[in-house]
Image (cartoon, grey):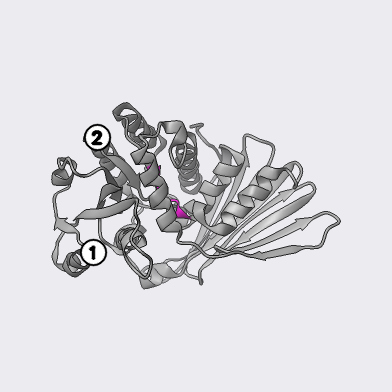
C-alpha cells in the first residue's frame, strides 16, 4: 500500500480521499491518504478527523516527510505545474488534477522533471475509467468502424452554479474558457483515440449577468490523421456528456458513464447499459500500482505524449479564442 497526501481539500480534493477510504465501499488495499495540506485548517478539521488525515498548511512539510510516497494536487490550475516540479524534486510521485499546466512549455517541464526524478506523473482524468469510455475505446480499436472520419463531443455541467469558486472564472486560471473544467475530459479522450491535434478554431458566446457563467463554447479540431472533430459545451445547463466516433462502416457513441450505442452498416442498433464503477477509485488505484512498480513513462497511467498533446490543444484553443481566428497547434 502507498501512503499519499492531498493538497487542497475543496470538493474535488475530498472526492479523491473519499474514493478510496470513504462512503460505503471498503477502504482500498492499494492506497491510503494520511496527510492533507490546506490554506486554513478550520473548515477541513472534521473531514480530516473522520478520514484519519494529519492536517497542515505547509506543502514543504509533506514533501520532506519520508513516509509519503505520492501527492495528489487538487489546487487551482495555475499552481499545478510548479507544484508538480516541487514534488518531483522531493522524490514524490504525483497525480495532478487537470489541467497539468496552462502552457505546453510548463507541461513539458513538469513531465521532464518527473522523468529525471524517476517518479510517476499522471493527471486526474477519471473519465477514462468510465465503462462507456472503455467500451467506446474497445470498439474503435477493433477496426469494426472502418476508417475513422469524424468525432463529436459534448460536455455540459451545471455544477458550476452549485459549487461556484471565483478562481475558476479568472482568465489566468481558465484561459480556454470552460475547456479546462469538464471539457478537457472529452478532449483527453479524443487525443487518446486519434492522436495529436494539428489545428483548432474556437468560439465562445457569453450572456449576462457577469456573476454567472452563461456561456457556450464550440471548438473544431483537425488531427494529424485525416479526420476532424467538433467539441461543444454549455456550462450552466444540466450535466450531459457525449462522445460519438464515426467511421466509414459505423459509429459508436458513449453517453454519460454507462450508456453506449453502436451502429454498424447492415446491422441492428445495439444499445448497452453497462455496470457503474467508481472511476476515481480506479484512477487512484492505477496510479498507486504504477508508483509501487516504479513504472517508467511508457507505463504511466497516461503516457507523456497524451498529457502533452492535451495541453498543446488547450493552448491552441486559448489562442484561437483570444485572436478570433483558426490557429495551428504546437506539436507536443
Residue 201 point in image, percent of width and height: 57, 46
Q: Residue at x 69, y 55 (%)?
A: 252
Most foreground residue, 154 or 315: 154
The answer to whether residue 216 is left or right of residue 53 is: right
Q: Residue at x 25, y 48 (%)?
A: 3
- Measured in 3D between alpha carbons, the distance from the residue under mark 1 to the one under mark 2, in whole angstroms, is 25 Å
Residue 312 point in image, percent of width and height: 47, 38
Residue 306 point in image, percent of width and height: 49, 38
The answer to whether residue 12 is left or right of residue 37 is: right
Most foreground residue, 331 or 257: 257
Asked whether the residues under the numbered discs 1 and 2 touch, taking CB atoms below 8 Å apart as contact, a structural biologist would say no
Rendered view: 89 above or below 310: above
For the record, the magenta segment spans: 122-126
Nearer to us: label 1 or label 2: 1
Q: Residue at x 30, y 62 (%)?
A: 14
Q: Earlier in the sequence, mark 1 or mark 2?
A: 1
The answer to whether residue 216 is left or right of residue 19 is: right
Dot 1: element: loop
Is residue 98 visible to the viewer in this orientation of the structure? no
Residue 297 point in image, percent of width and height: 42, 32
Rendered view: 227 above or below 44: above
Local crowd size for mark 1, using a 10 Å CA cut-off: few (<14), some (14–19), many (≥20): some
Q: Residue at x 25, y 56 (%)?
A: 8
Residue 225 image label: none
Q: Which residue is mark 1?
A: 51
The answer to whether residue 183 is left or right of residue 34 is: right
Dot 2: element: loop
Quarter residue 33 falls in: bottom left
Q: Which residue is mark 2?
A: 91
Local crowd size for mark 2, using a 10 Å CA cut-off: few (<14), some (14–19), many (≥20): many
Amino acid at each position: 500500500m502507498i501512503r499519499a497526501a492531498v493538497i487542497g481539500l475543496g470538493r474535488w480534493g475530498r472526492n479523491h480521499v473519499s474514493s478510496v477510504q470513504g462512503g460505503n465501499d471498503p477502504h482500498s488495499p492499494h492506497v491510503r491518504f494520511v496527510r492533507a495540506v490546506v490554506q486554513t485548517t478550520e473548515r477541513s478539521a472534521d473531514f480530516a478527523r473522520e478520514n484519519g488525515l494529519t492536517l497542515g498548511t505547509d506543502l514543504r512539510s509533506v514533501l520532506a516527510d519520508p513516509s509519503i510516497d505520492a501527492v495528489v494536487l487538487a489546487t487551482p490550475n495555475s499552481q499545478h505545474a510548479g507544484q508538480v516540479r516541487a514534488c518531483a524534486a522531493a522524490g514524490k510521485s504525483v497525480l495532478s488534477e487537470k489541467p497539468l499546466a496552462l502552457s505546453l512549455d510548463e507541461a513539458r517541464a513538469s513531465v521532464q522533471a518527473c522523468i529525471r526524478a524517476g517518479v510517476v506523473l499522471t493527471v486526474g482524468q477519471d473519465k477514462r475509467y468510465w465503462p462507456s469510455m472503455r467500451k467506446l475505446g474497445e470498439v474503435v480499436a477493433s477496426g469494426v468502424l472502418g476508417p475513422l472520419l469524424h468525432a463529436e463531443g459534448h460536455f455540459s455541467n451545471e455544477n458550476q452554479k452549485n459549487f461556484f469558486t471565483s478562481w475558476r472564472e479568472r482568465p489566468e486560471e481558465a484561459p480556454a474558457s470552460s475547456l479546462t473544467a469538464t471539457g478537457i475530459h472529452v478532449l483527453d479522450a479524443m487525443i487518446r483515440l486519434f492522436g495529436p491535434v494539428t489545428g483548432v478554431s474556437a468560439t465562445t458566446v457569453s450572456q449576462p449577468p457577469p456573476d454567472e457563467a452563461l456561456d457556450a463554447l464550440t471548438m473544431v479540431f483537425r488531427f494529424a490523421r485525416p479526420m476532424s472533430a467538433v467539441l461543444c459545451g454549455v456550462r450552466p445547463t444540466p450535466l450531459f456528456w457525449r462522445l460519438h466516433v464515426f467511421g466509414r462502416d459505423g459509429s459508436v457513441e458513449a453517453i454519460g458513464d454507462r450508456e453506449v450505442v453502436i451502429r454498424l452498416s447492415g446491422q441492428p442498433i445495439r444499445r448497452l447499459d453497462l455496470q457503474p464503477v467508481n472511476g476515481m477509485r480506479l484512477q487512484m488505484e492505477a496510479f498507486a500500482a504504477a508508483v509501487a512498480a516504479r513504472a517508467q513513462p511508457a507505463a504511466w497511467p497516461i503516457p507523456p505524449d497524451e498529457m502533452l498533446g492535451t495541453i498543446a490543444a488547450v493552448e491552441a484553443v486559448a489562442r484561437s479564442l483570444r485572436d478570433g481566428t483558426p490557429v495551428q497547434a504546437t506539436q507536443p
